[in-house]
Amino acid sequence: MIIFAFLMDGLEEPVGKFKYFDINPRNRSAEFEYTINPKWRNQGMGTKMLRTAINYLLATTKLNKLYCQTAAFNIASVKLLDKLGFHRDGILREHHELDGKLWDDYIYSILRNKWKTS
């Protein structure tokens, strides 16, 4: 597992974190997850962070595919992944419990040849 912390000048705590894991060298794929500090949500930090991390990974590794999982109720994450061009590969039905309710999880991926570096 490799973790990147995203920092801003003058702040002691990270704006967000990105980690990738389950690296499969044969299939050239890895899973990732990310979090944004609640103080910095809805300010474009998630977009900047994911673009930076994915650009870096694709420039420095031979990975062809990055994928992640997010809960259907996490609308901000769903919108972010859609905005960045990720493909919704599938749905894990009633996979995520929150407050006594079971929610679907979505599986998203991006392929190297579909990623737009800008």
Image: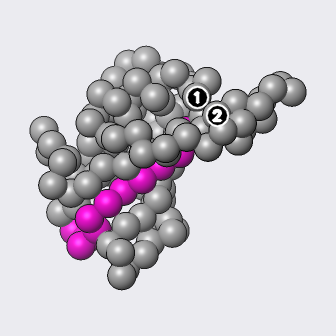
Residue 11: name its quadrant. Answer: top left
In the displayed structure, does residue 48 sit left or right of residue 18? left
**Amino acid residing under circle 2:** Asp
In the displayed structure, does residue 64 sit left or right of residue 17? left
Q: Nearer the viewer, residue 23 or 36?
A: 23
Residue 103 location (% of width, % of height): 70, 30
The residue positioned 26% from the left and 46% from the top of the image is 52
Q: How crowded is the residue under tag 1: few (<14 C-alpha within 10 Å), some, or many (20+)? A: some
Residue carrying label 2: 104
Q: Are marks 2 and 1 in contact (CB under 8 Å)?
A: yes
Give the residue furthest to the right.
100
Which quadrant of the figure contains the C terminus? top left
Specify the label residue 72 is tagged with: 1
The residues colored magenta run 60-70
Tell me if residue 22 comes above or below residue 26 in the rendering: above
Q: Nearer the viewer, residue 102 or 81?
A: 102
